[in-house]
Image: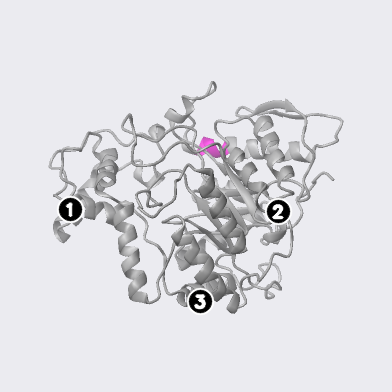
Amino acid sequence: MTALAVDLDRRPDTGAAYDVVAQVHLGVFYTGVGPQLVWSDPDGLDHTAVSTYLRIVQLLERGLFDAFFLGDGQRVRENRGRIHDLDPSGRPDAITQLSALASVTHRIGLVATQNATYNHPAELSRRLAGLDLLSGGRAGWNIVTTDNAWTGANFRAGAWLPHERRYERAAAFAATATALWQSWGADVPVEAHSELVRTTARATVPPSPQGRPVLFQSGDSSGGRDLAAAHADVVYSLNTEFDSAVSYAKDLRTRLRACGRSVDSVRILPGATVILGATEAEATDKARWVLEQQMSPPRALAFFEQFWGTDLSGYDPHGPLPDIEPSPDELDPSRGTITPERRTGKTALIASWRAMAAERRLSIVQLAREVGTRRAPFVGTPGRVADQFAHYVRTRAADGFNLGPHTIPSSLEDVVNLLVPELQERGVYRSAYTGSTLREHLALPAPAGAAS
């Protein structure tokens, strides 16, 4: 255990041990696009059929999960101006879909990914409040921002916002939505007149049993962490490896205190992929197969096309890197979601990839699997992974995990049928739901100023 992890065992105000029993909170993030899911799995379910979502959400409720997240997208994915045909499309809006799932579930939380860049606070807060009321207090809002211009082109006020300005708007948006949820029965409207959010509105939907939807936020960048510290009830990130998770938790709790919030007021659920096997060797083999399927040869070419800035479809993905020079322009952040560390220095990055490929004799697809994907941090037998999860929550490195499935439904069936019993045996996972709302599942305090 690291020194930081020991520090997280103690309250920062008194130095006393936390008086809560460590419990693993679990959510599932069902993404809409990207390589995380093996879309080509011959045993996979139809990713646009309502029966798939009914089956998955009922499986997760049987597994006593806190929440089911739906990803969302406002436009079909593109690559260099062409429709990206490596992902499925046709999924209904998340709130619409979760409203249908609310009628066939009883306890599990239902979290809708909704965009704070290209929506309006009064309209979106109403729809989220409707889902919260219809589900009996089980709704959550996954607050996301979008930094690409091709999504913005779908909207009347679709001007592209630079990276950090997205978080400025999201903070103002979240504050306005929260004020609207708290204003039920008030005699005066909620007004917002900032540069990025302007509205005058009144609440039109009464509060649910949990007061308002639970706010989720993915806070990796500095702006994202500030937004999470100020507004979120649950935060998740890519800081999943243990030492990284410890550092992230310490940083976020420092920001919470700076915002005048208790360090116990937010649940930290790093994103995680779990690959289970009867033996360590079986799990390792399965992880290798998943990686190969996630970064297929066509996807590898599409990945490098972003950096070369040109069509690479004529290159053999099993051959060497393209022998042509990339375009001189840096990656355009207005054209898609690009991690901040790759927005500059493209030439040096490609040079380092060429050196790596030459030294290790890697093909295009092999290199893409090294630099274009994230390895699953939890690979092993159910008992081994359960021990890891227990260690994270007992050291306060995390409060649980937001799982990204790689195959539907098999990877989630493994978690429910094999991992959950091991967690229960270790005393770090519920044996039954004890509350009816998402806020109760997460052991979160009542929202400040909630209307009643």
Residue picked out by circle 1: 363
Task: Find numbered disc 2 in the image and state the secondary structure of the residue it sits on.
Answer: loop
Out of 77 and 277, give the one closest to the viewer.
Answer: 277
User: What colour scheme has been applied to the protein in the rendered image?
Assistant: one colour
Q: Earlier in the sequence, mark 1 or mark 2?
A: 2
**Mark 3 in CB contact with mark 2 (< 8 angstroms):** no
Question: How many numbered markers are drawn?
Answer: 3
Out of 377 and 281, give the one closest to the viewer.
Answer: 281
Task: Find numbered disc 1 in the image and state the secondary structure of the residue it sits on.
Answer: loop
Query: Seen in the image, is 133 located left or right of residue 186?
Result: left
Magenta-colored span:
164-168
Task: Say which residue appears at 69% left-offset and 64% top-offset.
Answer: 433
Name above or below for residue 114 compared with residue 375: above
Residue 387 numbered mark, or none: 3
Q: CA distance from mark 3 to mark 1?
A: 37 Å
Residue picked out by circle 2: 260
Q: Amino acid at mark 2?
A: Gly
Task: Say which residue appears at 67% left-offset and 75% top-offset.
Answer: 17
Residue 167 lies in the magenta-colored region: yes
Query: Seen in the image, is 83 located left or right of residue 301?
Result: right
Q: Nearer the viewer, mark 3 or mark 2?
A: 3
